[in-house]
Structures are given as structure tokens and as C-alpha cells.
Image (tube, helix red, strand yellow):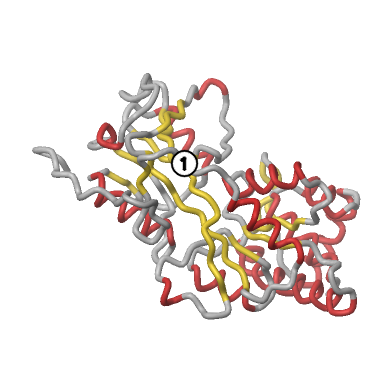
Amino acid sequence: MDTEAVRSFVRAAELGQLRHAADELGVTQQAVSKRIATLERQLGVRLFTRTARGVEPTLDGQAFLPHARHIVAAADRAVTAIRPGSRALRIDVLGLRSAQAVLLHDYWRSRPATDLDVVTLRANDPREVVAAIQAGDLDASFRSVTDPAALPRDVRMVHAFDSPLELLVGPRHPLAAARTLTPSRLRGHRIRVPGIAPRSEWADFYDQLVTAFDLRIDATGPNFGNEVLLDILADSPDVATLVGSRDRYLWPAHHDLRRIPIAGPTLAYPLSLLFLRDNPHPGLRAITDHFAGLPPLPEPTWRPSWAPQPTGITPPAPAPRPAGGS
């Protein structure tokens, strides 16, 4: 099996476009297309479906992707074994438009000589992420293990930064004209957050958020992706969602969506960085030092119980339910 063909498949799956994969790999789009076509013939399955936005892995492609990542990582480790220090620092982010990716890009722009490999490990269970770090497939990951006792001794978790939440609504929503919102003003409103996976850190985050502020989080049904959610918000007079202030979303101008900061207190999603305690990569320390130097959020700020809590700041007690609330 051609390792570069597998690498082309992995990057195309992660980036969603053959052209972007080709640019990153330093080859032509035609070369990437031929590599993937050869790989499909060898495997006897189709790996991609073409869409208006680019390409998406088929069900067979989704099944092959984690194994393909291991193949590429093993090949890279083999090269690293004979060329120490030559490999890029590989960091996992939740999405290429997430706050983690945005801040990593800001870091790279200030230090363009930094050799970074930013990937998206499609795993909800933090144990899978920890296993990938222990196997050497990743140098670090922006994930949190909410139970410190479950963290292996050879893996370290440090606080990276807090991401303040904003309410995202369409133009007909009753809160659309607000400049800022307190958490209490969100009570009773339907906040759509699809794709809250069991045992994930964000499942625990939203459980604590609901308890602390008596919010109505709707996580029912499958997650059809950000584009579908944004379409729903644009058309709905009563559905909202929560997004990080640094997360990047794109929508058509006619959607007229509104991002509204939440304060009094600020609702902070804590981002941590997981990595091996004895990771030798020289670029890792610079990354952790950079995030440690980011300015803190203004107080008061609410964080879940497993996040670092500033002195004197504790999560509020659960609010009483309004009469007739659901």
C-alpha cells in the first residue's frame, strides 16, 4: 500500500477538499486524485463522495480513516527514528474553525518558522485521545479529562485557555436585538446543541451548565453539521445555540445571524492541552508557554467544576425553576 496515497486520503478527509490537501502536500490536485483512485482500486471500495463543498468520506472511508491515520503516523515515526527532530509538532484540535485552531494559527503567524501539523482526531471519548497520545500518533490534543483519577501517570493535562460563550440566534429570535445577555435571560429559551456525545467533556460541561443556570439545552436527534444548524437558526423564531467567541462560522449574508456576548457572569468553556510528560519535541514547550501567557477572562466568570477556578469564584447554586417551566 502506497503510504503517500494513504496520506493524501487522510488530509483530503480532514480538510474536505482535494485542492487543499494538494496544497498542503505540495503536489497537484490531479496527483492527489490519482493517488486516492489507486488506493480505492486496491481496497475495492469508494472512499469519497463529491459534494458542492468538496469531498466527504463514504461509510467505508470513515471506517478506513482511523486506520489510515495510524499508517501515516507509523510511517512518520519510522522516518523520525532515523532523522531526530525532523517531524512537525502534531496537535489535535476539535475542528479547523474552532477556537483552538484559530489561536494556533495566531501563534504560527507570530512564529512562521514553527513546523506545525494541525489535525482533527474524530474521537469523542477522551480515552481514545489519550491512547493516541501514548501511541505517539499525537504530540498534544486540546481535550480535557474531567476525572483527574482517570488520567494516566505518563500523560499531563495543563489549562490552555478559556473560551467565553456567545448566544447565536436568527433575526426573528426574541433576544436578537440584545447587545449582551446575562445567563438568567437565557432561561426558558430553547438552546439547540446537537451532537453532545456521552462521556465527552462537553457532555459534562453542558450538564453542569444546565444545573447551574436552569437552561433548556436541546441535544435531541442526530447532528447534521454546522451548516444545517445555521439554516435552522436563520429560519427559526425561537431556536438558539451557544458558540465560542473565537470559533469561526460562515453563513450566507441573508441569514442575518447575531452573535451576542454573555456576561454577568461570563460562561467559560475551559480548554486543556494533553501531552506526554516526557514528550521530547522542542516545539511543545513554546506552545504551552504561549497559552500560559494569554490574558485571563474578566471576572465574574463561571467555569465547570473540573476547570481551574480563580480564587473566590465558585459556580452558582442551581436557580429555581420558573412556574410552568419545562
Instruction: Give the farthest residue toward the left.
Output: 323
Give the x, y percent position of residue 35.
85, 61
| In this picture, residue 269 sits left or right of residue 135 | left
Q: Position of residue 10 (x, y in %)?
A: 73, 61
- Residue 160 or residue 75, whichever sits in front: 160
Above or below, 300 against 204 in this view is: above
Residue 119 in which image quadrant: bottom right
Q: Secondary structure at mark 1?
A: loop
Badge 1: few (under 14), some or many (20 or more) residues near its Cα, within 10 Å? few
Quadrant for residue 71, please give it. bottom right
Quarter of the image containing the N terminus?
bottom right
Identify which residue is drawn at 48% across, 35% down: 230
**What amino acid is labelled 1 in the image?**
Leu
Choose top left, top right, bottom left or bottom right for residue 214. top left
Foreground residue among 305 and 71: 305
Query: Is 279 or 17 nearer to us in this picture?
Result: 279
Residue on which the image places disc 1:
297
Q: Is residue 141 left or right of residue 178?
A: right
In the rendered image, residue 250, in percent from the top left (x then y), is placed at: 59, 33
Does residue 139 sit above or below 166 in this rendering? below
* Side of 106 where 87 appears, left or right: right
Of the 4 image quadrants, the one containing the C terminus is top left
The residue drawn where x is 36% and y is 55% is 304
